[in-house]
Amino acid sequence: MIKNVAVRLALIVAAAFAPPMAAFAEGPSKNVHEPTYAADGRLIPPTDYREWIFLSSGLDMSYNEKALASAQPVFDNVFVNPEAYRAFLQTGTWPDKTQFVLEVRSSTSKGSINHRGHFQNGDIKGVEVHVKDVTRFDGGWAFFDVEGSAPAAKLPMTAACYACHRDHAAVDTTFVQFYPTLLPLAREHATLSTSYLKDEAELAKAVH
Amino acid sequence: MIKNVAVRLALIVAAAFAPPMAAFAEGPSKNVHEPTYAADGRLIPPTDYREWIFLSSGLDMSYNEKALASAQPVFDNVFVNPEAYRAFLQTGTWPDKTQFVLEVRSSTSKGSINHRGHFQNGDIKGVEVHVKDVTRFDGGWAFFDVEGSAPAAKLPMTAACYACHRDHAAVDTTFVQFYPTLLPLAREHATLSTSYLKDEAELAKAVH
């Protein structure tokens, strides 16, 4: 009798203190950065993306062959949620519920002790979110133009981004070719798209 | 007697399952990204810095007034360990054991579908680490030029970085003026350095 009461009490107390089982379980961790939506289906933009994994930053990029250099070039900072990043490290692919954030920030040339080139200043010129949610979106991914924390409607399929990402993205519909820490991994895992490999081969021929 | 045995057993079992007290305690979490050193005092460089907090990226920056634009401009990606970042959000200051990493990466202009501006490619041109360790270093901070995971010796105090950081850094010895998400916080917390405020005022006068 004594033993039973003691054991029962011990188990109750232990259960009260035990950390969630997920902390001990093997397998993928829960994605706390899954996309969330308002009741009407609009995306609730992630606001903590600056604490996610930085993939790269470019300056004054344009996919338009005739583009001239900007007088006011902007930086494009790209982040992805940590869970998706860790999955990519293992597989070279993006899991469902991946969220990319492209933050467009204006640049300053002369400021403080800087005399050349460009650094980023406080003006955010735009934020776009690219979400993988395979049961929700045709084609599995959707683009959103966001402003602060206001819910954002999915950009229509006619928006230029969809076709360009579909036709030229190195992995799935993402421009891994511009993310220097990820491109080699995609190559190792053989997850580079056929269209990207074709573009890459043509560019190499053009150079040689 | 029964009660005592039961309670004692319960406490033993609870202690076995209880998460570390730090998880419940108020105050700063343990810094798992503290700087570590070899037996001879050289810094063991952090190799997971790409998973830290991204502060900003600049292109072709130079502090030299006469600097001409580079033919091969490089990007400077700056990261700080997450614990230091969270402390800065609260206080506008850097705690002891902060580690900054400056990763210098070469750029490509024409590549894939890009026709203008610059994006980052796979070539790391250099990595520098800036460490705050107040009981170890004169002045509290030290700079290191690192290569991969090889232990690195502290740069001598005569290296140009020390004086420039001391004389122009916006917060402590760090160039927060180039980190757009942090500069407003430092202003709010009134932790901007006197020398930076002076530089800023002079630049404003020069413009007007």
Image (cartoon, coloured by chain):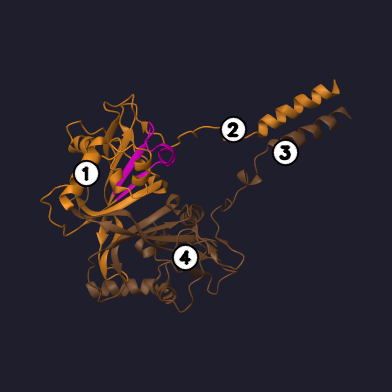
Chain colours: A orange, B brown
Q: Which residue is identified by label 1?
A: A201
| SS under mark 3 | helix
Amino acid type assigned to the residue bearing label 3 in the image:
Ala
Mark 3 packing: few (<14 Cα in 10 Å), some, or many (20+)? Answer: some
Which quadrant does the C terminus of chain B fall into? bottom left
Q: How far apart are marks 3 and 1 (CA)?
A: 61 Å
Query: Is residue B56 on the magenta stretch?
Result: no
Q: Where is residue B111 in the image (x, y as percent from the top left)?
A: 22, 50
Sequence-wise, the earlier of marks 2 and 1 is 2
Location of mark 4 (residue): B130
Label 2 and label 1 in one chain: yes
Q: How far apart are marks 2 and 3 (CA)?
A: 15 Å
Q: Is mark 4 on a helix, strand or loop?
A: strand
Q: Which residue is drawn at 45% across and 69% down?
A: B173
Which residue occupies the extreme top position in the image?
Answer: A1
Q: How far separated are the C-alphas under marks 2 and 1?
A: 50 Å
Q: Are marks 3 and 1 on the same chain?
A: no
Placement of B68 over or under A76, stated as above or below: below
From the image, state whether disc 2 or disc 1 is nearer to you.
1
Check disc 2 and report the residue beneath it: A20
Give residue B9's position: percent from left, percent from top: 80, 32
Describe the element under mark 1 as helix, strand or loop: helix
